[in-house]
Image (spheres, coloured by chain):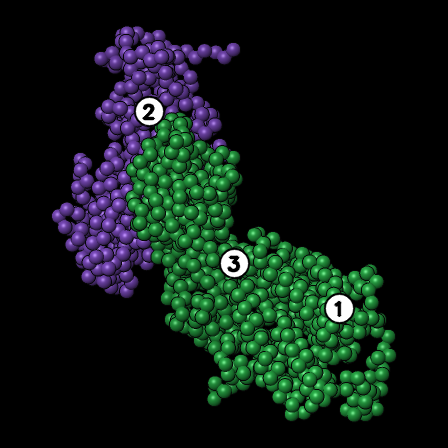
Chain colours: A purple, B green
Amino acid sequence: MEKIAFERPFIKKLSAGMPSKFGMKTEIKPVTHIDDVAVEELIQKYGSPLFVISEKTMRETYQEAYRAFSTRYPKVQFAWSYKTNYLDAVCRVFHQEGSWAEVVSGFEFDKALANGIPGNKILFNGPDKPEEYLKKAIEQKAYIHIDHFDELYTLKQLAATLKTRPRVAIRVNMDVGIYPKWDRFGFNYENGEAWDALNRIMISESFELEGLHAHIGTYMMTTEAYGIAAAKLADLATGLERKYGHVIKYIDMGGGFASKNTLKGAYLPGTDTAPSFDEYAEAITSALINSGIKPENLPMLILETGRALIDDAGYLLGTVIANKRLSSGYRSTIVDVGVNLLFTSFWYEHQISPARPTTQHTEETAVFGPLCMNIDVIRESMVFPLLKTGDRFVISRIGAYNMTQWMQFITLRPNVVMIDPESKVHLIREKESLETIRQQERIPGHLQAKKQ
Amino acid sequence: MKKLKAETLLFLRCTANSYSQVFFSDNLVFAVLLIMVTFFDAFAGFCGLLSVLITNLLARALHFHPETIRKGLLGFNSLLVGLGLGIYFGPGWLFFLILVLASVFTLFISMSLQGVIGKYGLPALSMPFILSLWLVFLATRDFTALGISDRGIYTLNDLYLIGGNRLVALYEWWNSLAIPESLRTYFISLGAIFFQYSVLSGIMIAMGLLYFSRIAFSLSLLGFYAAYLFYHIIGADLNSFNYSYIGFNYILTSIAIGGFFLIPSRASYLWTLFLIPLVAIITISLNKIFLVFGLSIYALPFNLIVLLFLYVLKFRTRVSEGLREVWVQYNQPEKNLYTFINESDRFRYLQYFPFKLPFWGEWTVSQGHDGEYTHKDEWKHAWDFVIQGNDGKTYKKEGENLEDYHCFNKSVTAPGEGVVEEVVDDVHDNPVGEVNLKQNWGNTIVIRHKDGLYSKLSHLKKESATVKPGDRVKEGQVIARVGNSGRSPYPHLHFQLQTTPYIGSATLDYPISYFIRNTGNGYCFCMHQKPARDWQVSNIQLNPLLQKSFRLIPGQHIRCEYTHNHLPHSEEWEINADAYNKSYIHCRETGAKAYFHNDGSLFYFTHYQGKRSGLLYYIYLSFYKIPLGFYKNLKIDDSYPVHFLFSRTQLFLQDFLAPFFMFLGTRYTLEYLEQDDDMSPGSISLKALITTRFLRQPLKRIPVDITLETGGVYRLEIKAKKDKIRATCTVF
């Protein structure tokens, strides 16, 4: 008989909630395995904390998203948003599935090229595109999404010197009835700035105007906003055709689809409120199909969604360091995962599950990271089973942004592994060592130890 | 001047064809040989030629269809009449008058018969000749001024007059040759067709026949010996058979049925064997009747049986694979057969309406033709489509709500251009698991595509139709959404084709023109197939560069700069369309023509005529079949008619066996390699492989690297053993 795990004694105020048919128990489902690989085994082999990415989930999510759009619209193309997760292995899975690359910096541009993506499958976004990269993008025939007039002028000059017509789109911002309104990227639709930009592009004849781009926000919980955005872009497209006889080749609806994480302050869990790909697809494609664009001129629909494709595939495995009672008497658990690794804990109420079955007894607890900083809070309060030092846990849905926004702060970044569809584990990013950090550093001569 | 030259050429051609047409051929060598044979009796030969000339000249003067004249279809009957008269009568003014009259008369009958029975798709055969000769013979009995020729009777005298002792000796030697009796009769029968009752002429005709067609030659032997055997069995007077030299009836019947009017096959050979005894019986009985009038029956039994059989075949409600009439006559059984083998696969659906799948993206067939649930009996030729998720399920969550089903509320598109015939839009959508048997088909749209060709889409979502009766719809236009109305327990799209406009009409067995099938290991291009259960299918996504590259419009030109074995050449071709709206690329210098077809989704060459080398020939081979969508690594398969890749000598043995077994074969494969840009492709590379095969093993391979570029540029590198060609062709 297996030894029953010890759980600490606790005292808890009896508060009768709504009983379900199972009574009043709080069931916390453990995550013992990820894609048939035991969590304990993973940590034994690769250390704790550990990032785990499920290739199977990635592919399935991608295919689900692709199906949602491609069965509703004749021409659909996804472009993997590099900033969401630019680990090469991750990018390559999406590229293998057929995704292009969407990059927002020179670094990401080079990374996409290094991943074997030709320039003409790279969408170059963002407010900061250095001249040398604009030049590179023009030469590589990438699609440059112009963000502001100054960029337009630079591009025009470059086009003249390089004697080629850059392939461009403009990013359009607009009021789609949501708050906050994103108006810092691209050209505004309502005040005519977008048309101003389009007119200049068409009249200058130094550009190949390929498409229109909008990215209305992030973590959009409403699909109607996409419908409005698509309709406004379609309106620009029909206007271009009417005015210049120019048929654009694509409409890029950007990303911003919500994942199933729960936002802080949300009343209901994200699993219940986040719209599905089908709902986003329905809103976007209906707007395009019902727009004034002629059926034979329907442009390719590009989607740059990142979060919704990768979030579910990422797990962060960790270990309990200690349990501690705060001065208020409130319980706290210190774990080896901090905000340095889990940047998204600033806005998500991450789901943390034990890696082994526990009893139904739980206690409200704060979950703190290991950093010696007051801000290192993973969860301010959560109902958590009674884990003890050395117990493992799994944080789910952390695939997006954490592996790009993580910090080398106080401690080093851990291993990242990917579990392939055959449940084989591959190390895709080795943990950092002192050497990793030190090799970038240079010590001025006068600070170096003098040789005797 | 040019016109005169063309006219002379046409005239020479139609004269020659008037000879070879007796054996359904248009082979020039064969014709020359036959002309020589007719001149064994110089006078008769002259009369024959004269008749041919008179007939064809008159036909031309009367502006009959030039093609009919050119093929010798009018001339050959007159030829036989001329020969018959020439053999029977001696020269004289009256005779020539009768010859001219008889020729004209034959022409009239030929043309009239063509007009009358041609409507039933039947040939006139040699009926005009028989009718004409009978009538002339019956009449001339009263013409005492006509001198009857005795040349045929006193052969030795004639020969002596022509060639002296040596010719007589040669003739004797010929006759003394130890040729088996049956074979001798065979040769004489062959010669008798041209009123030449000698072994030598028979041998020459047999050789010509062998040169012209192996199948026709073997059929001539088959027909003759079948009759020979039959006579033997019934114990009939072999002598009568021998004497009247009407053995050619069996030979001609055999060639006509076995290989000319029908595609040579096991079945056509068997029918030949079966019909020959019938010809024999009719020959004997007709002989009895015509003896009363003192007339020979000539080729009457052949004419009767062949016409009868061909006519009867037209009443078949279903044409079996084995016994098919020749659609396009290439005047050679081999060509007919090889083209048929190839085209029955390639062009069976050429005239079919190009239906596409009525949706976007990849769907799965949940019930195909002859399905296990509802596609039965009159409604068996229908498809049900659903969308499957990664888990193979058609729904997410528990599948309790309509919205859980992947296909629910997805756009339904028009499968082809047409006019909306009927729309039902007010049937409620059933909850999952329930069916509405009262309004069986649920919400339905019927579209008329052609007269007698309708498509029907059923179980649509309530009030989702975006069209109304009378609306014209384009292919791919959204017309409704998938729902769950009618007899539908879970959301799916029912698609069927039918011949009547009603909801509930019986289904029609009809293919989808092109679609892409995801086999799980890759994509394959399906052409005129019927998606089967569990197939994952999607419409072909057209590629703008491929579309532009192969949009060849009559009036355009193609300039080709190429090096052939390192020698530079340059040619200019023209895109033309003939009277039948068939487009072709025409090389004026060589006269070569490559016929092509482009239906918007597929470009393919249908035929090539001209010499079997040179750039256009290789273009024909390399661009043989090109779907106009780019799917990386997609492979296309096809085969050429064997006679387009093998030489006559290589095919010699195959020709004999072809109706039964093909040991030589050909193969065309095309692979899509790269495209430089997905959005606006500027260059696409393809690789074609042309292979000849022996017993399915490759014999010779010709790889061709193809690059298509914007501006209608084709770059080809052909690496045949003998021909190394690097070409750049530009359409302008």
B370 or A403: nearer the eye?
B370
Q: Badge 1: few (under 14), some or many (20 or more) residues near its Cα, within 10 Å?
A: few
Q: What residue type is labelled 1?
A: Lys
Q: Mark 2 lies on which chain?
A: A
Q: Where is residue A36 in the image (x, y as percent from the top left)?
A: 47, 27
**For this view, does B166 lie left or right of residue B251?**
right
Q: Mark 1 points at which residue?
A: B288
Q: Name the residue under label 2.
A: A351
Based on the displayed image, in which of its 4 quarters is residue A164 positioned?
bottom left
A447 or A418: nearer the eye?
A418
**For this view, does B375 lie left or right of residue B337?**
left
A50 or B154: nearer the eye?
B154
Nearest-to-viewer mark from 1 and 3: 1
Q: Which chain carries label 1?
A: B
Q: Mark 3 points at which residue?
A: B347
Q: Which chain carries label 3?
A: B
How many tags in the picture?
A: 3
Q: Which amino acid does label 3 sit on?
A: Phe
Of helix, strand and loop, which one carries label 3?
Answer: loop
